[in-house]
Every structure is written in structure tokens, then in C-alpha cells.
Amino acid sequence: MDSCGHCSSCEHSMEMFCSEGVTYSFNSPDKHLGGMTFGGFSKSYVCKESATLKMPKNIDLASAAPLLCAGITVYSPLRHWQAGPGKVVGVIGIGGLGHMAIKIAKAMGARVIVYTTSPSKVADAKRLGADDAVLSTDEFQMAKYSGRVDLFIDTVSAKHDVNAYLNLLAIDGSVVLVGLPNEPLEIGAFNVIAGRRSFAGSNIGGIAETQEMLSFCAEHNITADIELISAAQVNEAMERLENNDVKYRFVIDMSTL
């Protein structure tokens, strides 16, 4: 993002909350050159030095690319809600966001419980570092950690019952939505009043926090699980995304453009 300097968001390293004058790196009106921005799908890219990031030397660029999207999207709320030793973090959904949340929360020292509707993903959740995996369609399994989860990272981008997870929170626990459902989600009043629970949301992160995330991931040898594809495979990749056939991010080799 390129900030405008009209508000204090950037001063506090929270550029993602800028309310005006922002030029996003892709699919955004370009206030400098006109037209639209194309972000990582451009052959060349010009931005202010203050909006750049330094990639750690020991990190693979292809598998690190999704850290700048999925990585910071889950790192920011995990850090803000203080995931770490002694905390139980639930991750709802195992996909591009969810698999990164598992890795990062575990590296922060939290006990990580994954909630999924797919029996086939239970083993994969544990491979990624989860301490346990729960089938959310099984009432008995859902009750296993009732009242013990301090923080849920909700990665689901479809309408779903968030009350089922609010009811599993410990006192002062939070369900934080990072997915983008197309339809409104209903919240039962008693489900937040009881236990002083919260339902919140989180965006990406500012430049400073993103740099911090990259350093953290490099230190803990964390990258995304990717499939590297050529530019000619983009349409095939989109079809596979529709069929949920990717584990867990496609990355385009721009040298093939």
C-alpha cells in the first residue's frame, strides 16, 4: 500500500486501516499514473522505499510469497490477541489461511486445535503442527475443548455458524474472523455476554508488522505449502481452486509470463 499522509494510521504502523488516499498494490485506481494497479502480476513495480520489505536470506522466495498475504493475515491477530505459551488457539478451516495459522500459532508456543469439516484433513492438520484436530460436524468432538479455547482464528469465507465456536471460548476469549463470507453472520447475544466473549475481525498488517512476521517465519523456518505453476497454468489453477484442489497456495513463476 502507498499511504497519503492524511491520517495517523501510518504513524502507528497501521496503514491497512487508512481511511482515504490509499493506493492498493493490485486492482486499485492508480492516483499517480492513472489506470489500475496490477501488483505482483506486473513485470515491473515502483513504490516508495517505506512500502518495501526485506526478504530474509534464508527463506525460499516462492514459498515465502504467500506470507505477504496469508502469513500476515493470520500473524497480525495472533500477535494482537497474544497467542503464546499457556494459550489455546483454535483454527477454523484448513486452507491457504488456516495452514499458515497452524504453523505460526504453534511457533508462538500456543496449543493449537484445528476445527475442520473434512475428515481427510485431520491427518494433515497434525502434519502442519496442530496438537489436535476436531471434526466440527461431530458434537462429541466439538465438546472436547468447551470453555478452554482462548482464541479462534476463523478463516472460513462462507456462511457458517460462529456461535458454535463462541460457545467453546474460555472467559474473555475471542473469535477473530479473517475470512470473508459473502453473507452476514448472525451472533446470539447470550453467546457473547456469557463469559465476556468477543467476536472480532482482523485485516492484514502494516509494513512494520509484516517485516516482523517475515523475520519470525525465517527464524522458525516457516513458509507456505505451495504448488509453483507457470503463467500458462493460471486457468487450470482457477478451476482447481473452485474444486478445492490445492494444498495450500498456488504461486505463479513470473519468469514464465
Image: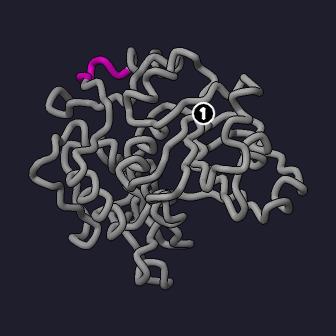
Find residue 199 and report its horizontal and vertical position in percent. Answer: 71, 57
Residue 252 shown left or right of residue 11 in the figure: left
Q: Which range is magenta?
A: 229-234
Which picture quadrant has residue 180?
A: top right
Which picture quadrant has residue 139?
A: top right
Which picture quadrant has residue 3?
A: bottom left
Q: Nearer the viewer, residue 62 or 52?
A: 62
Residue 135 shown left or right of residue 27 in the figure: right
Residue 30 shown left or right of residue 158 in the figure: left
Total count of labels: 1
Find residue 238 and report its horizontal and vertical position in percent. Answer: 44, 21
Find residue 46 and report its horizontal and vertical position in percent. Answer: 22, 60
Asked whether 187 falls inside the magenta stretch, the response is no
- Decide: few, some or many residues near mark 1? Use Cα within 10 Å; few <14, some 14-19, many ≥20: many
Q: Nearer the viewer, residue 193 or 53?
A: 193
Q: Residue at x 74, y 35 (%)?
A: 143
- From what the image shows, is residue 49 above or below residue 235? below
Q: Nearer the viewer, residue 90 or 14?
A: 90
- From what the image shows, is residue 239 above or below residue 58? above
Q: Please indicate, yes or no, whether residue 159 appears anywhere in the rendered image.
A: no
Q: Residue at x 51, y 72 (%)?
A: 18
Q: Which residue is mark 1?
A: 115
Q: Please indicate, yes or no, whether residue 156 appears anywhere in the rendered image.
A: yes
State the predominant SS element of the stretch in magenta: helix
Find residue 142 and report its horizontal and vertical position in percent. Answer: 71, 33
Q: Nearer the viewer, residue 158 or 117?
A: 117
